[in-house]
Image (spheres, rainbow, N blue to C red):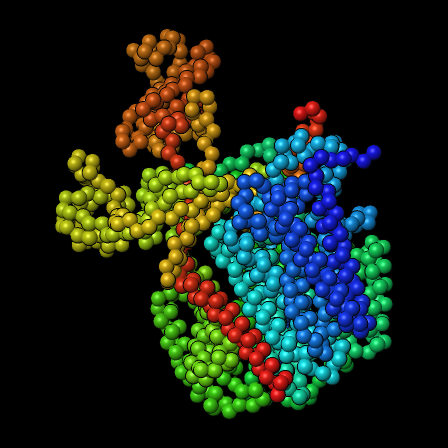
Amino acid sequence: METLFSGEWIEAAWIGRFLIALAFGSSLVSVVSLIRGEYQWGKRAFQVHAWSTFATIGMVFFLFASHRYEFQYIWKHLNNAMPMRFIFSAFWGGQEGGFLLWMFWHNVLGLILLRKKTIWTPQVMAVLAAIEVFLTSMLLGIYFGDFQLGLDPFLLLREAPSNLGLPWTTRADYLTAFPLFQDGQGLNPLLQNYWMTIHPPTLFLGFASTSVPFAFAIAGLMNRSDRSWMRPALRWSFFGVGILGTGILMGGAWAYEALSFGGFWAWDPVENSSLVPWIVLVAGAHLLLINRNRKHPTALFSTYYFPLLSFILVLYSTFLTKSGVLGDTSVHSFVDSGILPQLLVYVISFIALAHIALVESKKWRRALLFICLLLTLLALKGWAIEAISLFIATMFAAGIRAYLKDIQRTEEEESLWSRDFWMFVGSLLLFVSAMHITWQTSLPVFNRFLEPWSDQLTQLGTRWNSDMLLDLAKHNLAPGTDFDQTYHLVQIPLAVLILLAMGFAQWLKYKQSNIQRVLRSLFLPLIASIVLIGMLLYFFPYEWYESPRVALLFAAIFAVASNLDYLLTVARGHWRKIGSPLAHVGFGLVLFGAVLSTSQKEIISKNQIGDISSLNEELNNREDLLIMEGDTLSMGPYFVHYREKYQEGIHVKFRMDYFERVPNSYAPGDVVFFDGMVFEAHETHEASKLFSDDMEDHWMFIPFPNERQANQAQIWKSGIAGEQLFTLEPRIQINEQMGNAPEPDTRHWLHKDLYTHIKWGRVTPPETDENGWMGGKTHTVQVGDSMLVGRTLLTVDSLRAIRDEERPVRGLLDDDLAVVACIQLDNQTRIQTHEPLYIVRDSLIIPDLYEAEDFGVQMRIESFNPQAETLELTVWEHISVRRDFVVMQAVIFPQINWLWIGCILMAIGSFLAVAARWQRDQQSKSA
Amino acid sequence: MKKSHIVSLILVAALVGTFIATFTSTSRSVGFIEAESMVGEECKISGSLVREEPVVYDPETDPTLTVFLMEDKSGARRPVRLLKAKPTGLENSESIDLYGTMKDGEFHATEMLMKCPSKYNENNHVLLSENEDPLS
């Protein structure tokens, strides 16, 4: 019997699923009609698809707005406490919403492309509709045995596979019976901020816009005699470059401002996999730029291939990040949601489409199709990895065949002094850079390919005595954690070359240029960059081994100077010419700001642990500062004071005041310690940074301090806290789902940022016993040892046997053996000696719990070793004397604002270029 | 041969070179036993926290040292000295990836990644336990 579930809005599920089915069906119809040449049908079907997608999105929003927790997607991403302004973040907080967002942009772009029919529209739309078929299938939520086709956003909670068979799912009143279902899980608090509202839509629009050049390239391959597809493809490429670039850097800004990754870029697989399509798209756009007007195209294969590759890399990136295959190599945690096979099919289908389109002969196309079908069968038989390896080999062969035979090639030699040649070189460099990053990111995937060949590799490795093959046989490659080794080693030289080409080629003309004139125009930027790098090195010294970074900084300055000069002399007044140099200036500044701010970052919280650092050499390279509540410590150019901690909403905030550092001044008669020696000042002076600078002129060494000197002496300090400058409040977010997460607080200046975050802080009261005692740790100590118990310094002064007159006072019998430990307690306001006992009565140890009330310290001697003269001492600290403390990190990023300025300029430049191309193409059409 | 071909060839050769270079320069994921034979070499170890042993983090003595016991995939257990403040959620982590080197029977980790159980599974436990008493 069907149960009637009360309170469920079951109709919404059916309407939603109907809309998705309609969207899926109409996209299929659209593809078929467009391929068969029935344009009107195809157009209508695509419109139906677009509007049913929009309706689906509207429906999901409505379910969010009405808090319909019977739907799994809503329950997982929303809760009653969440303000409605986060409804967008919640919407795309999961994979289903992500796909819907992506589809939304595809449909917007598709509708724009449909507005005007050109000879390319039918094929372009066919490709877009095909992409949509796949994307919509991600939302179907149909199971074929174990194979899951898509994730249904309208899935009811009780239907979720993980809940199947649980007793509550059959209760008609489950929604009202369990409080769990009256409130949702809520979006991970880490995602509840405005970055989550703006970053995903920008990024997904960027992703969606790579599919337009892809579609144009496929269309262009279908009709190779006509290369007019390049103009619209170029406009869309630049659009994608601008949007995707903004989206990526927005992600960086998010990480920097709101998350505690410690910077804006961490070469994380997720970041990489959105960067790589962007780089390839930039390369593709520049090749399109070379070839759009040429009668005899150059590098035509790459001109087709890069736009194709860019979109394929977007799909690959989706595969990497959403399938869970990256597993634990990324800080972004992914859950395998069971759609790995489907995502894989998606990537592979479009790789196949691109390569089959690349070859021209019908025979080859049929053969390739046939091989793909065979391999599909092989994969279904269970040899998936082998099939994919063979597939990649086949596609590679197809690419080579197309390059050699099917794409028109010119034997015309490029002039060395032409813009075309250097743009081509630049594009290739970009391509190499993108492939290197992809490779490093894909190591977990590559391991899976090695796995089936493990035995063969081991055999070969032993036969040839090759360690490398033996290593490969273990299929356990992992990306290194040393970014210099893993990425910078290759990426920095590439970036240097790219930037130099960028600065140089801007002055070249297409086809052929007068090199002397070019060199003359380059003279000024070159001189300017040499002067600037000189000044830079004066203010920011680099070590010799950092010379690649210096080269990169120089190349970036040169690229900026050269393009800026071009902008001001050649492009001034012609807005259509501004786009390219402006974007180049922006790109140069991004790299300049990124390299300078990270390589010159100064961790000012370093080496502040105090006396302990001398005890443990490992501590010297630690980067964190421990600060007690109420204390003021010197930190870099500041003094930092931990004022208080308070809770606000889901955040525990730590209020840290920053004070100016002013030189300490000493007057005659002041006594200080330095390095264990005592000195007395003989004149009034301001302290320098180092004691050694002052010692001879202002201080007198006191070999035998008198009582006054011994009492007065304080540790020498070069600076003291002056005026309060500002307050920063780094915080810890209370996050039950993901675990508490630190969030940084950053002070911005024009020329630098001070970035601080909490490494460790207490957000819940410490654990105590019923009387408020904490700790209870046992230490092995001997005479002379000291340790800190909270704020009290405990020193074992001496040990002695008990005196007879003490026995009655301490409640001891005459036969008891007892050792008295004289323990000095010092909490800076008072020093006292306390005497806990170690008692043995009839060869039994009598535990003696000793409390030093004034200090809030409790101790007990557990055992005494007379030979070694060591004690086992357990100490407790009382909660009432406890002072709170935090472990924090503070970093200065100098000149980081160039990065953000560059980012904005690059986006503006790209959009100006799109607008200029658009206007020019319109004019050339009407002419 | 065209100039562009020469440039392409050089770059492709460079690219292949960097690929092969990764085979030797990247860190490897190994077990504790194997890591002990790789003296001074960085490696990656995956495993999970041994929950019976406490995670020791005493920021007052050293704010950047966390000590815990980890079991690798083959079942070998070694103490780990993570040179960082204790990451939040370590106690609840499902699996741990460490980067570092083996030194005197202890693993000195400089970098650590964790995987935490998905929130969804956790709540299934909640649902299950609620159902043990159907009248709740």
Q: x%, y% of residue B4?
A: 63, 82
The residue shown at (13%, 50%) is: A683
> Residue A824 sits in which quadrant?
top left
Q: Name above or below for residue A921 compared with residue A76.
A: below
Q: x%, y% of residue A466?
A: 70, 61
Q: x%, y% of residue A753?
A: 40, 57
Looking at the image, can residue A660 be seen? Answer: yes
Question: Residue A287 versus residue A112: which sits nearer the camera?
Answer: A112
> Residue A429 sits in which quadrant?
bottom right
Residue A206 appears left or right of A769: right
The residue shown at (57%, 61%) is: A202
Question: Residue A926 versus residue A736: which sits nearer the camera?
Answer: A926
**Number of numbered discs visible in the structure rendering:** 0
Q: x%, y% of residue A689?
A: 27, 54
Q: Quadrant of the C terminus of chain A?
A: bottom right
Q: Quadrant of the N terminus of chain A?
A: top right
The residue shown at (67%, 67%) is: A111
Question: Residue A884 versus residue A905: which sits nearer the camera?
Answer: A905
The residue shown at (76%, 52%) is: A18
Question: Residue A249 versus residue B68: which sits nearer the camera?
Answer: A249
Looking at the image, can residue B16 be seen? Answer: no
Residue A382 appears left or right of A901: right
